[in-house]
Structure formats: structure tokens, C-alpha cells
Amino acid sequence: MFEVYSLTGMAAHLIILLLFSVLKGLHSITTVSKVSVKAGKSISIPCLYETKYQNHVKYLCEGHSWTSCSYAVKTNEADPSGKYSIFDDKKQKIFTVTINQLAHKNTDYWCVVEINNGQDYGHYFQLSVTRGTPSLCVDHQRITGYTGESITIRCHHSNSVEMKWCRLGRNCVTGSSGSIDGAAVTTHMRDPNVFTVIMSGLRSKDSGWYWCANGDIQIPVYLNVTEKPITTTTPTTTISRTTCTDTTTISTTIHTVATMEQGKNSTVGENKQHRASFDPRILIIPLSVLIWIVIVVLFIWFILRHKQRKADSSVTPMAEEEIIYSDVRPKKQGLAKVDKEVTYSDVRLYKKGKRSFAESETEILYSSVVTKQRMKRGDGKDTEVTLEHIS
């Protein structure tokens, strides 16, 4: 009998330890419980963990059962398929998992913190993937607000159960007004099927994950609070995807008011609204390109100029000249007569040509003279013959 009680006590003790371990794991991580999302779209889920797990590995586990779920993505190991991504913000102690191209089979997941030499801690959440419009959605899952100003979040729902606005790991506002960590929150439902949330007096510490809740369904929203940019007339185009429809919103904002004076907003007059802040560094690239173009043009001009001068110096004006060749031959006489000198002259007229060493026209006479030669006549007497060539 004693042994039976002992075994029963041990079993009860083990059950209590197991329940304590499971409950401890559930309370170690905080996240949403159920999210409605359209098939084919993406969703980001934040998972808040305790400070002591700051340097631990975190991961997303897919499957309905904790004991049989499989790794989807880990902080120390990327997903090669690109369907899952994970980011660990150790400062806020939140790791965010993103699931892309959602299908109807992507429904059951766990946010998990890995414990070395111990039981991992996980928190279950469910995705309700629909073909039509989700039962709860927002215009943009990631929004930006400016310090000291207000921001409006519109939560679209199919039917209102109990609407509220909460911050991950903090309190919720369920009525028409309230506050979260000192930031004023007002809500209303003036528009059909829209739960509107307005947060006023934003501070940088208000950055973080929030969610709209309608009964047991939530939709996470990340708010980034930053200082408003200095005056600029350059339009800023923001492309963001809504979680409600398949449309993509493109918004253009033109900043015309200067802010950020020791954390306080200051408004300038109308005569200063059109003065855009000028940064001389923006001229570095255009001036560099202009200087480079000028150098190239000058270099090309110098090369062409050099070639032109070289061509001009290689061409020398040629003077025109006349060359006259004449051929004068007297009639031959019988060698039997008295001695007579015979002169041969050849004169030919050539066209005018160019000279390389004179600029004006010049007449040039070339003459070659051959000494007289004596030839024998038929009667045995000598005859002198003179050959002369004039050109």
C-alpha cells in the first residue's frame, strides 16, 4: 500500500513539474493568438521574450503539436527558400518572423526560444488564411509617426465584437479614450466597419509593436516614431502593401515645414517655406562629370589641332614650271660635200607641274653638250658632228 502511494505521489509530482515547465514556457514568450490574412500575401508576427533570453537562439516552428513541429527558420540559420525570415531586436527583446506567400496549409506555428541543455520555450499562434477579405486587417502593417505629432490607424473588420488597441506586452485601450505608456489614445467607430485609433503626443519610446483586436483575432502593427525631416521640397514616394486587399498604395508627401529644434516642433513663415535646405555635397558628382567632359573635349581638340598642323607642314607648295623640249634636225646632206657641222636639238613641251622648292613660276633650261666627233665621209675626209641636248 505504501509503495502504491509512493508511485502515485511521484507521478503527481512529475505531472506538476511538467505543467510548471509548460506554463513557464508559455509565459516566457508573448505574441498574438490568431491572425486573419489573405492567401498569397505576407504577414509579420512579433514575439516578445524575457531579458534573460536576449542572447539565445530564436526560431519559428511549424506544426500544430509542440512535440512534432518542424523548424521553419532560425536566427542563426537563414531559410534558403525565402518563404520565411526572422529578425531579433535585442534592444526591445522582440524577434519578428515573416511568412511570405501564405497558403491555406500555413496555419499553425510556434514562436520558440532555444534553451541550451533544457526544454525550449514556445508560444503557439494560428493563422486563418482566407481567399476573400480577412475578418480583421489594417491599411499598413508598418507605419511611421513623428515626434510630438499624432498618427491614425484604421482597423477594418467584418463584424464588431469587442474592439481594442494594445501594445505587445503592455496594456490595452478598450474604450473611446485611454493611454499606453503615457501616449494618449482615442478611438471611434464613426466609419462603417472601421475601428479608428488615434495616438497623440508621440515619443521615440512609443516605437514598437501594437495590435488591433476584435474578439480573439488580432492584427499586428509596427509603429516607428522618428523626428520629422527638415524642410525639403523634394517629394517622397512611399510604396506600401495593405493587409486588406491586393492593392498597392503609393503615397507622395512634400515636406514644407522645418522641425527638430531640441525635440520641439517649430513652424516657419510662408516666406521661408519655399527655401529648401541646400547641401553643397550634392554638387560634387555633377561638377566632377562636367570637369571630366571638359577635359575629354580639350584633349580631342588638341589631338585634332596637332594632326592639322602636321598635315599643313607636310604639304609644300609646288611652283608651276614649263619644260620645253625641242628637236631640230636639218636635212641631211651627202657626206661627199664639204665639211659641215651637224647639230641635233630636241625640244618638247610639257605641262606645268609643281615644284617642291620654289613658290613662283620659273623657267629652267637644261643643256647638255657633247664634244664634236669626227666621222669619216665616203670620200675619206673627216667630218665634225656636234650633239647638243637642250631641255
Image: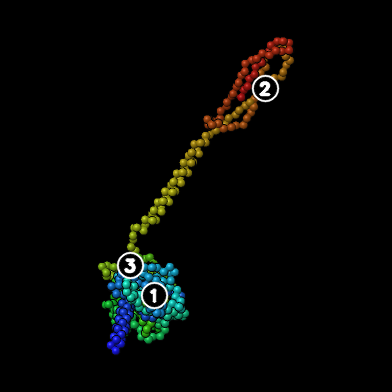
Q: Which mark is residue 175?
A: none
- Quarter in which the C terminus is drawn: top right
Return the disc, 1 or 3, that comes first in the chain's sequence: 1
Q: CA distance from mark 1 to mark 2?
A: 123 Å
Which residue is rendered at x = 49% and y = 41% of the image? 308
Q: Residue at x 38, y 56 (%)?
A: 285
Is label 2 in a helix, a strand or a loop? loop
> Is label 3 in a helix, a strand or a loop?
loop
From the image, tell me which residue sits under label 3.
229
Q: Residue at x 39, y 56 (%)?
A: 286
- For marks 1 and 3, give the one nearer the viewer: 1
Which disc, if any, is residue 61? 1
- Is there CB contact under 8 Å for labels 2 and 3? no
Q: Is residue 373 above or below residue 123?
A: above
User: Callout 2 environment at 10 Å: few (<14), some (14 to 19), or many (20+)?
Assistant: few
Between the residue at mark 2 and the residue at mark 3, the CA separation in whole angstroms equals 107 Å
Q: Spot the residue most to the bottom.
A: 1
Q: Residues within 10 Å of mark 3 (few under 14, many from 20)?
A: few
